[in-house]
Amino acid sequence: MSDLHAAVPTYETGFRKWLITITVITCAIMELIDTSIVNVATRQIAGNLGATIEETAWVITAYAISNIIIIPMTGFLSNIFGRKVYFTASVVLFTITSFLCGSAGSIYALVFWRFMQGIGGGALLATAQTVLVETFPPEEVDKANGIFGAGIVMGPTLGPVLGGFLTDNYSWGWIFYVNVPIGIIATYLSWKYIKGGKSKEKTKVDYWGILFLILGIGSLQLVLEEGERKDWFNSDFILTFSSLAVLGIVAFIVREFRIAYPVVDLRVLKNRNVIIGCMLNIAFGISIYCSVFLYPIFVQGFLGWNATRTGLLILPSSFLTGMLMGLNATLLQKGVSPKALVILGFSAVIGYEVITYFLATPDSGEWDWFWPQMIRGFGFGFIFVPVAGLTLAGLKGNDLAQASGLSNMLRLLGGAVGIAVMNTFVTHRFAIHRNDLISNISQYNPSSNERFYGLVQRFQAQGKSYEEATAMAAGAIEGAVSTQSAIISYAEGFLLIGIICACVLPLIFFARIKKGQVTDIGSAH
């Protein structure tokens, strides 16, 4: 009888199984929506709170940083508090901070509450996969992973669309308030149905590792964000936090290699495929977050699109990405090399960035952007799953989990650092292009003279005095120079993303994949 009792399955069945699935997937999608929902509302937030676009970028960056910090910590936090308590508490934290984000009266308050929201959200994303795998029977684990993978794609996809609709029809605060009723329901369902108590084993916590991780990443992000405004290393502020970033990162690496219970086991990097996979994930994170960050600012700022129009154009390409993820899983299971799929995916993304560089003009319309977006969606569809397969090939047990967690963390870190670097790059290039264009405007340049006096005559024809018309003409030319400089700078931002992907792409050829090797990619999510 004891043997029969021991054989009773621990997974869920029937209605309860699908109720748990809906709960955790809803929480994961809600967290992922918030990684991109702000992107189409940055200008509205900046205008309402009296902040610059660069300061508003911190609303996105703060969320990404706290996600990065919390994701590698979720394993031992679940063991300490129990998965049920930890998951439910994370839903509560995410819900409360969502309301506080929407109520924020200053950019500083909004950034702080976004950081706290990310702590709750990162835990939801990291824990949802484990809950799903333990909810389904072994023969249906692939189905669980497929559902979770679809959620990962749909979250960032729905973010810009939902954010655009709420911003255009209500206010930017509703992009956060929308989480509150969903969070209340998810809190009840999580507490009632999710299982998982405290670990019976005594868990050691790598407090110093966590501290060094926060210090290193936080200081690095602060340097990248504030460097341009504070004249980089001519500023004591930048020098101080650069030193803290180096000390924090070096101390973190040394600590994680030397202790037996690291918060992130960096020893897994001794595997060549893991290093290559991590580098690809960093480039993938940069390409996802930076392109989605640049695109809304460009089309809203220079083409005059509203937030809804901006978000809807991304939707078809994101659906394409989701469909291709399922195809990729099938191809890998049949023994197709991840190398070939990753090369195909990154090549498409590089093509998108190059096309967008030439496409980014004031005269471009929806159809000019639609097909490049589809190329982007195609490329992303052939990167996520194959990179996971390449990274985890041949790994087992704890090494598999550590490599998965590390690669996921670095993908988010690539996005967070990438946005800050992109802000600095665009600002720097804007100043260069503006100086170049301004130098062409002088009384000795026939073309600029013709343009200037043509504007003067137009304003005089509207009833303005010569002095008024002259001042207005000078202002119009100044505005045109600034606009053109910004357009060129943002176009170069897209090109930079493509160059980064092109630099990383050759690493794929150094990966070792045995012919016909099949990798369980479930934990890669």
Image (spheres, rainbow, N blue to C red):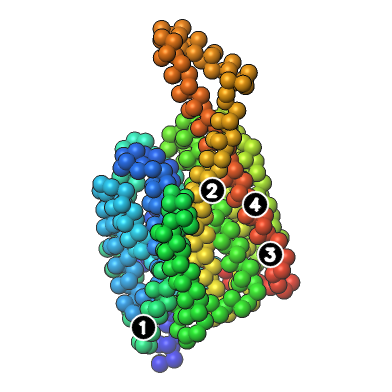
Q: Earlier in the sequence, mark 3 or mark 1?
A: 1
Residue 482 visible to the viewer: yes
Q: Earlier in the sequence, mark 1 or mark 2?
A: 1
- The residue to which callout 1 is attached is 199
- What's the CA distance linking mark 4 and mark 2? 14 Å
Please determine whether, in this image, residue 486 is positioned above or below residue 262.
above
- The residue to which callout 2 is attached is 425
**Of labels 3 and 1, the one closer to you:** 3
Q: Amino acid at mark 2?
A: Phe
Q: Earlier in the sequence, mark 1 or mark 4?
A: 1
Q: Which residue occupies 67% across, 54% down? A: 502
Residue 12 visible to the viewer: no
- The residue to which callout 3 is attached is 507
9 with respect to 332 (left or right):
left
Q: Earlier in the sequence, mark 4 or mark 3?
A: 4
- What's the CA distance linking mark 3 and mark 1? 40 Å
Q: Quadrant of residue 118?
A: bottom left
Q: Amino acid at mark 4?
A: Ile
